[in-house]
């Protein structure tokens, strides 16, 4: 999961997309949620939410159940086991990135000049 | 900090490593709807209010008894049918994850037990200190909300939880003011309005807290969402 060029871990692109991250965040706070709630809380259009849920289902991150309640179709979505571990990994990666950024900020704090690209550290200071 | 863009407007920018979603708000709202606390807390508060003011003597006693019987019947119907149906229709459905007791819940329960067991024998001395030998002034809600407030304070709180904490502080100030007014102005203890507020302050504050949670849900979850298919 690590970016070889910079040494900074990179988050899972499938999860990092805003709409999908919102859906997964909601699902990680409950056992299951229906389509109506997901649509209202994320404020996505029906079509967009539907597409994002299909993408997540195809990636094995969520489980979609459809049932008929009072002659109406109700779609309920929950996280799969893989989804639970992937979202936990995602937040872990984000924490690592945040920690590295804090370290980088401290390193570049006033009084210490960051080396310019192409210049050796000795010349930069 | 919430993003100024809606999720529909945000793009999958590979250089953006900031968390693109206000995840704390999403988590908070999901848990709030799952618990269905808002309207249920307000209804329980109504019941407690009517039962509390029955204990304070006044012309309203009979009225409060009738209201208590009526509101109990309404509560049963609302708890079993109306509220779950309304929540489902208005906000959708969330099934709560079965979780063991949270650290906060355990801490609050323990502190409540301590308050109950220490407070009960101390109550006569406390009332003597504030020149209230007849024990007219209701000190329990102030102590309870103080406990609730201080057990809810954490170093890092998302803004939506911080706002609720400020509201809780407002409720604490309101209930303490009612008790404080009775302590500072002993004549006020004979006034009907003060008697009702003093007796029913726990019920009233639960109504306020329940309505606050409900308003959060109403404001966060729009009645109408985008219908168009923009894919």
Image (tube, coloured by chain):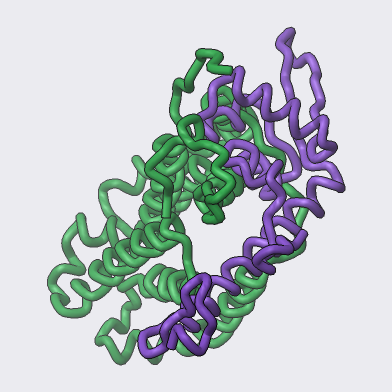
Task: Give the x, y percent position of residue A33.
Answer: 69, 35
Q: From the viewer's perspective, is residue B61 above or below residue B102? A: above
The answer to which image quadrant residue A111 occupies is bottom left
B10 with respect to A111 (left or right): right
**Residue B37 visible in this rendered orientation of the protein:** no
A47 with respect to B227 (left or right): right
Residue at the image point whose x is 25% and y is 67% from the top: B178
Quarter in which the C terminus of chain B is drawn:
top right
Chain green in the figure, letter: B
Task: Give the x, y percent position of residue B180.
Answer: 23, 75
Work out whether residue B145 or residue B161 is closer to the camera in this orientation and state it: B161
Q: Residue furthest top?
A: A71
Residue at the image point whose x is 80% and y is 20% from the top: A66
Residue at the image point whose x is 35% and y is 59% from the top: B167
Task: Give the x, y percent position of residue A27.
Answer: 69, 43
Q: From the viewer's perspective, is residue B77 above or below residue B34? A: above
B156 with respect to B49 (left or right): right
Q: How many marks?
A: 0
Visual hue assigned to chain A: purple
Work out whether residue A36 or residue B231 is closer to the camera in this orientation and state it: B231
The answer to which image quadrant residue A79 occupies is top right
The answer to which image quadrant residue B5 occupies is top left
């Amino acid at each position: 999961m690590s970016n070889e060029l910079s040494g900074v871990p990179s988050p899972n692109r499938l999860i990092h997309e805003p709409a999908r991250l919102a859906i997964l965040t909601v699902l990680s706070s409950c056992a299951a949620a229906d389509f109506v709630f997901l649509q209202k809380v994320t404020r996505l259009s029906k079509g967009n939410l539907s597409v994002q849920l299909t993408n997540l289902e195809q990636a094995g991150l969520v489980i979609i159940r459809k049932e008929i309640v009072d002659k109406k179709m109700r779609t309920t979505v929950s996280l799969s086991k893989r989804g639970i571990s992937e979202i936990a990994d995602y937040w872990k990666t984000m924490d690592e990135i945040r920690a590295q950024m804090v370290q980088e900020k401290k390193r570049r704090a006033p009084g210490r000049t960051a080396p310019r690209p192409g210049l050796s550290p000795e010349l930069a200071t | 900090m919430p993003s100024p863009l809606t999720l529909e407007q945000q793009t999958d920018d590979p250089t953006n490593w900031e968390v693109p979603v206000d995840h704390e708000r999403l988590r908070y709202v999901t848990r709030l709807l799952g618990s269905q606390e808002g309207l249920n807390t307000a209804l329980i508060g109504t019941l407690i209010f009517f039962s509390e003011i029955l204990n304070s003597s006044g012309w309203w006693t009979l009225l409060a008894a009738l209201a208590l019987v009526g509101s109990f019947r309404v509560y049963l119907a609302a708890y079993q049918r109306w509220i779950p149906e309304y929540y489902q229709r208005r906000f959708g459905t969330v099934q709560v994850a079965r979780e063991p007791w949270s650290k906060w819940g355990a801490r609050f329960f323990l502190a409540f037990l301590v308050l109950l067991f220490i407070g009960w024998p101390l109550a006569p001395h406390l009332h003597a200190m504030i020149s209230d030998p007849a024990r007219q002034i209701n000190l329990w809600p102030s102590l309870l909300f103080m406990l609730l407030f201080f057990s809810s304070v954490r170093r890092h709180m998302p803004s939506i939880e911080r706002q609720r904490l400020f509201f809780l502080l407002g409720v604490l100030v309101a209930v303490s003011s009612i008790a404080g007014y009775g302590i500072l102005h002993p004549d006020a203890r004979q006034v009907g309005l003060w008697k009702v507020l003093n007796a029913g302050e726990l019920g009233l504050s639960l109504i306020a807290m329940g309505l606050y949670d409900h308003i959060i849900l109403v404001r966060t979850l729009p009645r109408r969402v985008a219908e168009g298919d923009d894919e």
